[in-house]
Image: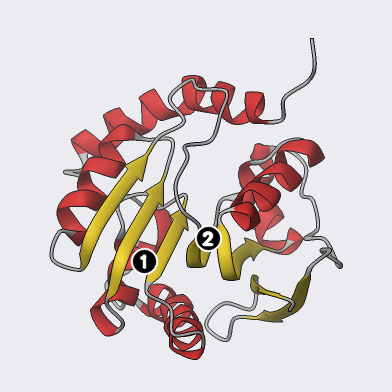
Amino acid sequence: MTYNPLTYWIERHKEWAGKSDAALRRAGGKTLHNGENDPTNARCAAIANHVIQELRAVNGTSLLDVGCATGRLSACVLKEHPVKRWTGVDLSGVALEAAQKRLRHHAHTIQTFTLNGSIQWPSFEPCDVSLCSDVLYHANTKDSHDFLIANTLERTAKTAMFVTWDTCMSATKGLGAHNSYYPFPAVVAGWELQSFDLPIYKTSVLHILRKTP
């Protein structure tokens, strides 16, 4: 049987999504993901500003959010730069329900998908800009790490943006419990890479991949 890196994310769904859904229900649909508990919204705003700049630069009319959780980060983006189509992917069905509710006034078309045991990513038209924030640290194998990057790029027409933690944050915040940290690839064929620290968190790194002509 051929190994499918998506198997890791499916197993992650079985192990984690149920617990996450229960926690979200108890918290009234709120999640710590992307600063849900941050009253100043500072980190969320810092990431969103970069996404907004990129959408404007490429005249983007569609946005993909991989690991969208309850849509807090996307809502920050769409408030300033509305899009015609927003697509969210997450392991948690409860989170996706919250995202749909939160974004119902911000996009003409809203699509949400959960892996939910499937061995295939959902099919949809590539979006102009994609965002994958605070997801890659969950990958406990290099295959599952690189697989998520590749599948996000496959569904991106112009620009992909990844937000990662560095090794210091993984160690000090206990994120190392998610197993090994894998560095973001220095070269991605067909894409121009720009990486820099986010000013609000020195331990957060933004990787921007722009499709080369």
The residue at the far top in this view is 1
Label 2 or label 1, whichever comes before in sequence order: 1
User: Residue 101, image x and y in percent?
Assistant: 15, 52
The quadrant of the rendering that contains the C terminus is bottom right
Between 27 and 134, the residue placed more toward the observer is: 134
Compared with residue 133, is residue 201 higher up or lower down, i.e. above or below?
A: below
Which mark, residue 133?
Answer: 2
* Separation (CA) of disc 2 from disc 1: 9 Å
| Picture residue at 21% right of the left edge, 60% below the top | 103
Label 1 packing within 10 angstroms: few (<14), some (14-19), many (20+): many
- Decide if residue 60 is in sight here: yes
In the image, taking residue 82 as reference, residue 125 lies left or right, namely right
In the image, taking residue 141 as reference, residue 95 lies left or right, namely left
Between 130 and 92, the residue placed more toward the observer is: 130
Q: At numbered mark 2, what does the secondary structure look like: helix, strand or loop?
A: strand
| Picture residue at 31% right of the left edge, 63% below the top | 85
Label 2 packing within 10 angstroms: few (<14), some (14-19), many (20+): many
Compared with residue 95, is residue 79 higher up or lower down, i.e. above or below?
A: below
Between 133 and 211, the residue placed more toward the observer is: 211
Residue on which the image places disc 1: 73
User: Residue 112, image x and y in percent?
Assistant: 33, 44
Residues under numbered marks 2 and 1 in contact, where contact means CB atoms less than 8 Å apart: yes
